[in-house]
Amino acid sequence: MVADKTQASPETSEIPLFPLHPVLFPGGRLPLQIFEPRYTDMISNCMRDGRPFGVVLIRRGADARLLSEMPQPEIFDVGTEANVVDFNQLPNGRLGIVVRGGRKFRVRGTREQEDHLLLGRVEYLADEPALPIDAGHQELVDILRELVKHPMIEKLGLDIDFDDARSVGWRLAELLPIEPEIKQSLLKLQWPRERLQELTRLVDKLRG
């Protein structure tokens, strides 16, 4: 059988990884405080070169390296590109940044630099299909409209398409008060309506 050479291979790249406890979704905005030298250097280099870094959820371990002999945290294998969209020096001396989520990726391998920055060999996942909201998920749209009225969420300046199943699913997944591991499982889904179905189940559970 002859391979189809017209089929595009998945795009791969090596990018810096930032293991964290929050989950970043495509199109989402995440405020961060940066204080470790390896990450201030990473942010500086990414901003200078106009390149993203990757946010990945910590499965086990700490996000800060308090001792040089501490091992890298164990991470989940699906993460999201992060692009710096705002930054400022905070009163506590830390660098405050806001990142916007880009493409999703799967980590295929990692290596550690001398400064302990983790680099990931990543394979970018296919874009999720753009689908309209069906009648069965309209209640989720109403919940999201109420959530974004909260002053803390308003400050994030989220760009939401309430007619797009991807946008509604991503924003609800990041804003609902659910465990990071559940958010991670929602991030991994590649079919927007499957994510909305799972969110409907989670909302019903929260109502208890």
Image: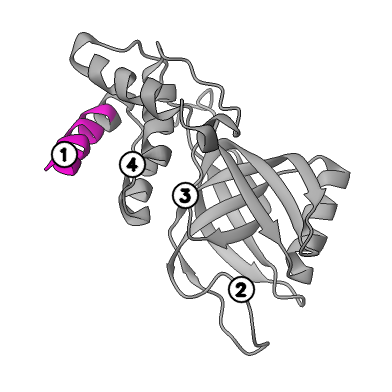
In primary-sequence order, the first of circles 1 and 3 is: 3
In primary-sequence order, the first of circles 1 and 2 is: 2
| Residue 4 is one of the magenta-drawn residues | no
In primary-sequence order, the first of circles 4 and 1 is: 4
In three-dimensional space, the C-alpha distance between marks 1 and 2, rounded to whole angstroms, equals: 35 Å
Judge by depth and name the residue closer to the eye, 129 or 21.
21
In primary-sequence order, the first of circles 2 and 4 is: 2
Say which amino acid is labelled 4: Leu
Disc 3 element: loop
Callout in the foreground (1, 3): 1
Q: Which span is picked out in magenta?
A: 196-208
Disc 4 element: helix
In three-dimensional space, the C-alpha distance between marks 4 and 3, rounded to whole angstroms, equals: 10 Å
Residue 146 seen from this side: yes
> Residue at position x 64%, y 43% from top?
82
Q: How is the image coloured?
A: one colour
Residue 185 vertical placement versus 38 (above, below): above
| Residue 203 is one of the magenta-drawn residues | yes
> Residue at position x 33%, y 19% from top?
141
Predominant SS of the magenta segment? helix
Disc 1 element: helix
In primary-sequence order, the first of circles 4 and 3 is: 3
